[in-house]
Structure formats: structure tokens, C-alpha cells
Image (spheres, rainbow, N blue to C red):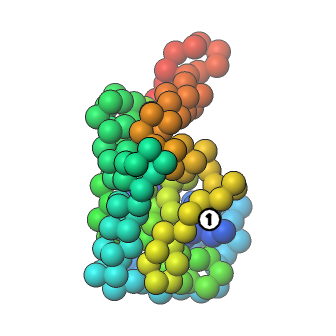
Amino acid sequence: MQKSSYMCVAFAAVFLAACEPKSPEKPAAAPGVPSLSVSPKALQPDVAKQWVNAVKNHPTADGSTVEQVLHYAQSSRAKVFKYKALSGEDDIGYSGATGEPSAVSITYWIGSKRDAQSSYVDLGYDMTPGGAVVLPGAGATPAVLALEAGRQAFVKWIDEAYENDCRDASTKKFVC
């Protein structure tokens, strides 16, 4: 799933393209997504940074932190993977049902075209109201499951995603 550089609404551990410019007002619904009746309740900046730090420092299966896995992947696959460093400014996802902050979203790109419209939003972690990372379950996206597995698994997933998402089936050329 791709997004613009906007604040997005998280719903049921899936990041939807129900986005709007970076402001805590009521999100506009994306095509095919029902309109939301509640406005997001923005976290205080210091709390948002605590949530982001919890995700950055969350350990993966190989002992690396999420931030270390992302950095390793970007370094080892610089031509096909890039992520936006987590800052807490526009990384917080909100529940579409309640407007409560509920997740930290990781913006990334697969391929060499890296404009705002080609970023992905299927990578992130649900959070408890107290700011603890919720471990992903079996229903998590393949990106999250690969990230949770550590450096090598995440790089392998990037390679597969690049092949599947960027190779044109008819011409066999990479298009992104």
C-alpha cells in the first residue's frame, strides 16, 4: 500500500490510505474507504517521540533493533530501498474508530522512484496507550513479519518485493 507524505489513520493494524495533510484535524476518506466520524487526538510531541523511540529500539529476532535493521537494509540495498527516519512528527497512526493514537508508521520506498506518492505504509507497529510496542501477530503484513525476523530476513523480503512490485510482467524490465 502506498501513501503521500501525510498523516495516516491506522485501523485494525492495517495502515489505510485515509490520509490528509499533516494536521490533527479530521482525516478525509480515501476512495472506497468509509468516511471517518472522529478527529484524531494528536499526541503531545514528547509522547510521540517516546513512541517512536520505543519502535526504533524494539528488538527483532536476530537481536538487532528495528532502527538497526532499517539502516542495514538501506545501506545494503541503497538502490532499491529507502526509509524515512522516524521522528515522531508524522509517524503516528490513529484509530479510525476512536481517533486515538494507536501506531507508529514507517514510511519507505521500494525501487529508485522515491517521490512522496510512491512511498509505502504497510510497515509499522501498533502501540499500547502507554507507549509500549505491541508484538505483531500472524495477521501482520509481510513487511512487518520480515522486519521482526531481523536483518537478513528483511533484506530478503526487500529483494522479493522489488522483484514482485517493480518488474513489468510483459517486458520483464524494472519500472520503479
Question: Where's residue 171, x and y in %?
Answer: 59, 13
Question: Where's residue 20, x and y in %?
Answer: 47, 69
Q: Quadrant of residue 106?
A: bottom left
Asked if residue 86 is positioned above or below residue 42 in the image, the reply reads: above
Left or right relative to 8: residue 71: left
At 30% from the left edge and 81% from the top edge, which residue is drawn? 45
Q: Nearer the viewer, residue 31 or 12?
A: 12
Question: Where's residue 39, x and y in %?
Answer: 53, 85
Residue 40 in sight: no
Asked if residue 101 is positioned above or below residue 20 in the image, the reply reads: below
At 50% from the left edge and 83% from the top edge, which residue is drawn? 129
At 28% from the left edge and 81% from the top edge, which residue is drawn? 46
Amino acid type of the residue tagged 1 in the rendering: Ala
Q: Nearer the viewer, residue 137 or 111?
A: 137
Asked if residue 104 is positioned above or below residue 144 in the image, the reply reads: below
Left or right relative to 97: residue 4: left
In the image, farthest residue toward the top = 171
**Number of numbered discs:** 1
Asked if residue 11 is positioned above or below residue 58 in the image, the reply reads: below
Residue 160 in sight: yes
Callout 1: few (<14), some (14-19), or many (20+) C-alpha neighbours within 10 Å? many
Question: What residue is pinned by disc 1?
Answer: 13
Q: Nearer the viewer, residue 12 or 130?
A: 130
**Is label 1 in a helix, a strand or a loop?**
loop
Q: Nearer the viewer, residue 26 or 65?
A: 65
Question: Where's residue 26, x and y in %?
Answer: 52, 81
At 33% from the left edge and 67% from the top edge, which residue is drawn? 53
